[in-house]
Image (tube, grey):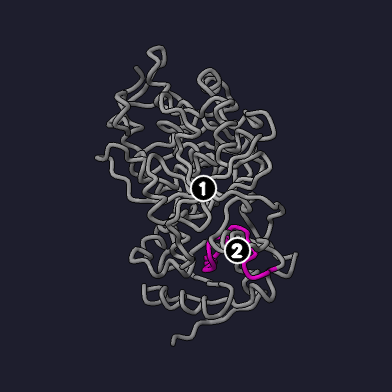
């Protein structure tokens, strides 16, 4: 077994200050985001550290993720985890991949997390992005951390695909079709009355803790309904609409059903009955600022303190494709900022890791800021019909950005109005 230099707390403190070494956090992504998975006094990660969980070393394309994060063989690396064994395993993988200047730090739990003078960072609203272990404790009758409620509903989200639910779901989860909260004529959220009724029929009040997830099933644009295989993207869309409606405590499983499977927990196939409630408890919507419609979107394009943010693929952005088999128009909204989602309308590769967990939030923030997407502005994220825009919005909301919305109509509604200009690679029309 290779022997790596072990550094002290004082040494790593100096290294974080001079910026000459790259600090690698190999704990689970949820610990990096802020969860105290081992009872540490302070959650989060060493300031400036990059997230490369030990779990990822089992992926064939691990080295591609390393290079994607601009961690080069010439860099000086310091690796830390919850224990020496984790650090050692990842250090060995780095060494086999051609990295030579590697040290390990084995005092995060015993020293760094205990000392409030040592800086940590965390995702500001990490409590709304939960782990499989958190859900397992919840459904087992326990009291997971940062949960003060006594009523919850676990929701398996899908679009026109109950088979995705019936073929395997988290025990106790009910299913919810995205059509319950979306109007298939416009793909916008349903009316306040319809939202209230749908939530009541699914047993949800404003005071219910709702935990959502979906199942990624490799969407294919050649299918009649590709979104039926993009369940976790649909789950985030439902989360956004529920928050808009007024559900006070909405959580999303980080990584969706894939994370649950990876953790080895039980999977059920029974059809769990919904338990309707008589009254949602408050008027809908409670958070109207989470969504903007056409008139407001037009205003935002003209204002100096706001931006429409296009969360679509590059072929959609330049007008090569519409992105959907039910949208004919191709192009983009003039003046919108491009925030590339990934390959197509049903994938979010640029916002997720390869195990479907949310991407390291500092990376997303840095990319956005380079494009002029900054938290001092009112931002309205949009895509074709709302799903990808909702996931980008959720990223910004988790980061604590104060003025973020979804332009609900997106390209679908914009392109259906002949009075609206549109733009392709060739220019404005």
Which residue is depicted at the point 54% across and 68% down?
27
Span highlighted in magenta in the image: 20-40
Q: CA distance from mark 1 to mark 2?
A: 18 Å
**Residue pictured at 48% horizontal, 86% vertical:** 3
Between 383 and 224, the residue placed more toward the observer is 224
Place residue 375 in its image quadrant.
top right
Q: Which mark is residue 249?
A: none
Disc 1 is placed on an element classified as loop
* Residue at 33%, 31% in the rendered image: 318
> Is residue 34 placed above or below 372 in the rendered structure?
below
Q: Is residue 21 visible?
A: no
Query: Disc 1 or disc 2, which is closer to the eye?
Result: 1
Q: Which residue position is annotated with label 1?
A: 273
Residue 62's x, y, as percent? 38, 65
Q: Viewer-proximal residue, 230 or 8?
A: 230
Q: Position of residue 372 (x, y in %)?
A: 52, 36
Identify which residue is drawn at 59% across, 73% down: 82
Disc 1 residue crowd, few under 14, some 14–19, many 20+, Cα 10 Å:
few
Label 2's element?
Answer: loop
| Magenta span includes 45 | no
Quarter of the rendering occupied by the C terminus: top left
Q: Which residue is mark 2?
A: 140
Give the x, y percent position of residue 195.
Answer: 56, 31
Find residue 242 and report its horizontal and vertical position in percent. 58, 38
Is the N terminus in the top left, top right, bottom left or bottom right quadrant? bottom left
* Quadrant in the rendering for residue 220: top left
Residue at the extreme top: 419
In the depicted structure, whether residue 355 falls above or below residue 397: below
Q: Quadrant of residue 14?
A: bottom right
- Cβ atoms at labels 1 and 2 below 8 Å apart: no
């Amino acid at each position: 077994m290779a022997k790596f230099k072990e550094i002290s707390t004082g040494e790593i403190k100096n290294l974080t200050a001079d910026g000459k070494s790259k600090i690698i956090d190999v704990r689970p992504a949820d610990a990096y985001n802020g969860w105290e998975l081992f009872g540490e006094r302070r959650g989060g990660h060493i300031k400036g550290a990059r997230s490369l969980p030990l779990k990822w070393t089992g992926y064939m394309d691990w080295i591609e993720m390393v290079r994607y994060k601009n961690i080069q063989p010439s860099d000086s690396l310091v690796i830390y985890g919850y224990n020496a064994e984790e650090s050692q395993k990842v250090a060995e993988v780095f060494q086999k991949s051609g990295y030579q200047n590697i040290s390990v730090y084995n005092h995060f739990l015993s020293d760094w997390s205990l000392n409030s003078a040592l800086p940590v960072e965390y995702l500001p609203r990490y409590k709304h992005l939960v782990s499989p272990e958190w859900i397992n404790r919840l459904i087992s009758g326990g009291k997971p951390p940062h949960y003060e409620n006594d009523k919850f509903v676990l929701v398996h989200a899908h679009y026109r695909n109950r088979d995705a639910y019936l073929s395997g779901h988290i025990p106790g989860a009910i299913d919810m079709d995205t059509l319950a909260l979306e109007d298939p004529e416009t793909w916008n959220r349903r009316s306040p009355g319809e939202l209230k009724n749908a939530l009541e029929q699914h047993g949800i009040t404003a005071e219910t803790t709702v935990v959502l997830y979906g199942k990624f099933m490799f969407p294919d644009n050649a299918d009649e309904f590709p979104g039926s295989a993009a369940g976790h993207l649909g789950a985030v869309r439902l989360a956004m609409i529920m928050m808009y409606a007024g559900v006070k405590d909405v959580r999303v499983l980080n990584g969706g059903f894939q994370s649950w499977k990876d953790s080895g927990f039980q999977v059920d196939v029974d059809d769990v009955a919904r338990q309707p409630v008589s009254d949602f408890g408050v008027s809908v919507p409670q958070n109207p600022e989470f969504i903007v419609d056409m008139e407001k979107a037009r205003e935002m394009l003209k204002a100096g303190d706001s931006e429409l943010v296009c969360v679509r693929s590059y072929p959609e952005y330049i007008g090569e494709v519409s992105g959907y088999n039910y949208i004919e128009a191709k192009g983009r909204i003039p003046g919108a900022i491009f925030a590339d989602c990934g390959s197509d309308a049903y994938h979010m590769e640029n916002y997720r890791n390869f195990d479907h967990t949310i991407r390291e939030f500092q990376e997303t923030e840095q990319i956005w800021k380079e494009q002029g997407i900054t938290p001092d502005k009112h931002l309205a994220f949009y895509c074709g019909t709302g799903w990808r825009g909702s996931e980008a919005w959720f990223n910004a909301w988790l980061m604590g950005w104060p003025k973020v919305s979804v332009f609900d109509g997106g390209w679908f509604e914009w392109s259906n109005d002949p009075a609206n200009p549109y733009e392709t690679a060739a220019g404005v029309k």
